[in-house]
Image: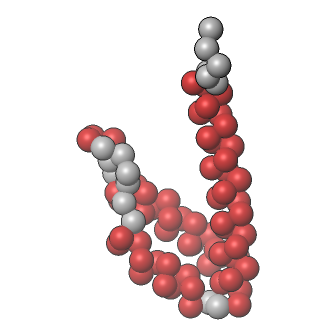
Amino acid sequence: MTDQTPPLDQVIDARRREMAAEHLLFGTIRFLAERHPELLNELEVSLGHLWDRSEGTARDDEAVREIARKFIRSLRAER
């Protein structure tokens, strides 16, 4: 037996960290966009530089950009 965390637990922990980071980041962007509406436009323009870090056939830059677009649309809908 090793001292390493089982792989499934690592995946669960990583997903929980991801969810927490998304929540905090989304809240931060919401706060800033209320005070600086041009922020969402700037973020949208920057999406061309966003890419998927996966390799091979799993890589889908456009899928990553579409997720970011959904976040931006959601923030715009809240205004």
Answer left or right for 29 relative to 51.
Answer: right
The one of 20 and 65 positioned closer to us in this rendering: 20
The colour mode here is secondary structure
Q: Position of residue 24 (x, y in %)?
A: 71, 63
Q: Position of residue 76 (x, y in %)?
A: 62, 78
Is residue 36 visible in this depiction of the protein? yes
Quadrant containing the C terminus is: bottom right
Q: Position of residue 29 (x, y in %)?
A: 65, 75
- Residue at x 49% of width, y 84% of height: 42
Answer left or right for 70 relative to 33.
Answer: left
Q: Is residue 37 above or below residue 76?
A: below
Q: Is residue 44 above or below residue 7?
A: below
Q: Position of residue 20 (x, y in %)?
A: 71, 53
- Residue at x 30% of width, y 44% of height: 55
Is residue 79 visible in this depiction of the protein? no
- Residue at x 57% of width, y 85% of height: 39
Answer left or right for 50 relative to 39.
Answer: left
- Residue at x 39% of width, y 65% of height: 50
Q: Quadrant of residue 57?
A: top left
Quadrant containing the N terminus is: top right
What is the tally of numbered marks visible in this picture? 0
